[in-house]
Image (tube, rainbow, N blue to C red):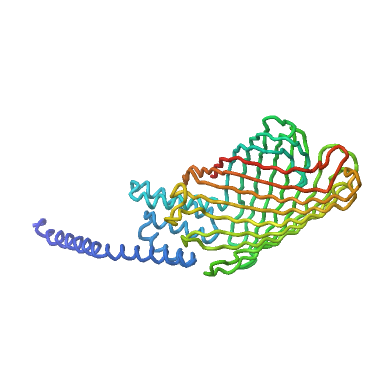
Amino acid sequence: MNTTRHKPGIIVILSILYMMSAFALAQEPDKTTSVLQSIDSAEKSLRSSQPDKALRALEIVEKLEPQNPWLWYYKGAAYAQLHDPHRAVDMFNTGLQKLHELGDPDPALAKMITYARRETRRQFFVLSWQLGLAHDSNVTFEGGGQTGDFISGTSDNVVGSTLRMEYALTVTATEKFTIGARAGGSLHFRIKEFDYQQYGGFFKYDRTLSDRWKLTLHYDYAVDYLERQSFLSNHKLSPSLTYYWPQTHNNWRPTETTFEYSIEFRDFLFPIAHALERDGIAHTAAITQRFSFPLADESKSGSLTLGYQFKSFATQGTEFDRLTHDFLIGLELPLLNWQDPTKYLVIPDKELTARINAQWHIADYRESSIIDRDGDERHDFITAVGVVLSQLLVDDPNDGELLLHLIFNWSDSESNVRTSDRSSPFTYDKTVAGFQIQWRF
């Protein structure tokens, strides 16, 4: 009797559960559609540089499918556009974690997230190390500037290395505060008195004033050693203002113009005759203009840089007070396969870049030279040309990049100084040829 009385209740409950299950199944396609539409909306918003709109669209995905790795990939991309790279890297890490929890079903997405994480991380942390070997036809030391501080007059082979680190303590849409350190030097095979080391650090503050203007304040300190003896202590403060030109579709277009002023406090750490003292202050004013131009593959471009720099050196002595003018031109060009411009020339999928720089240096000294046998005022004219070919060898988003740089530098120097024992003591024409291996994390 009791059992009969409960049968209708069981049937009702089973019927309700069945209807709820059917309703849930009917709603599943709507959930999937909503997720896909939201992700598509976020992607379109990011392409049009609307990260806030993309994050709002992704809120729906996070409620419905928090395990979806595409959600975290696009959230990371949105925060990167919002100039919050620390949070963006956290989002990318979450995306990789979700993929791993799902059994790594999408290797292509994992690769996209890993590369995006590396490029974003470089907005606040960069580490690089270079090691190279070169042959120098006329070994000189130019720790105090481009005036041939010491000239050996002989050739030698040299090994050089530099380690550099940068870390941004603060990164926002309007400002960035970066600190950094470096250590490097060179060892000669025969001319040991020209062995050189430098240790330095810096801080840089960038402030975005508007869509077009950015203000930068850069302070740098370095101490140079020559043959393991203190040689030069140098403080340099450089404020600069950069204008970013509107983007156009012209074949040639200006990209940015930079105005810079710097003041250096130089302390040469060795005893010398008073007239030859070089301790003092150097002022520099410079302007740099950069242009961009398209290549056969429209996704790649080259750049042209033009620059002028004026310096005034005031020292405690008389021999090295001078005014200098530097005219610069630089060209950076990806080397593409002329038969297939979507590929590079040597290793099809690895970037190959040529950088060509030329500089003309004019120095007019203010006082009569005690070195010149006639007591004339010294005048220098230096022409320098450098060519660097950079080939990407390894590109691993986790372990970094490995690059090979082939380097050739040539300089021709002219000076009016003459002495009784040498016709031209300041002849430091030279060629330097060599290579560097660079690891960049």
Quadrant location, the C terminus: top right
Depth order, front residue of 206/439? 439
Look at 27% across and 62% down and name the residue there.
28
Quadrant location, the N terminus: bottom left
Q: How many discs mark residues in the rendered view?
A: 0
Q: Position of residue 70 (x, y in %)?
A: 39, 56
Depth order, front residue of 380/159? 380
Look at 52% across and 63% down and name the residue there.
294
Q: Is residue 101 above or below residue 50?
A: above
Depth order, front residue of 293/95? 293
Identify the image quadrant of residue 173: bottom right
Look at 54% across and 57% down and name the residue there.
84
Indicate left or right for 238 with 82 as reference: right
Q: Position of residue 381 (x, y in %)?
A: 77, 51
Identify the image quadrant of residue 152: top right
Indicate left or right for 235 with 306 as reference: right
Q: Position of residue 302 (x, y in %)?
A: 55, 59
Depth order, front residue of 299/423? 423
Indicate left or right for 148 with 86 as reference: right
Q: Position of residue 351 (x, y in %)?
A: 49, 50
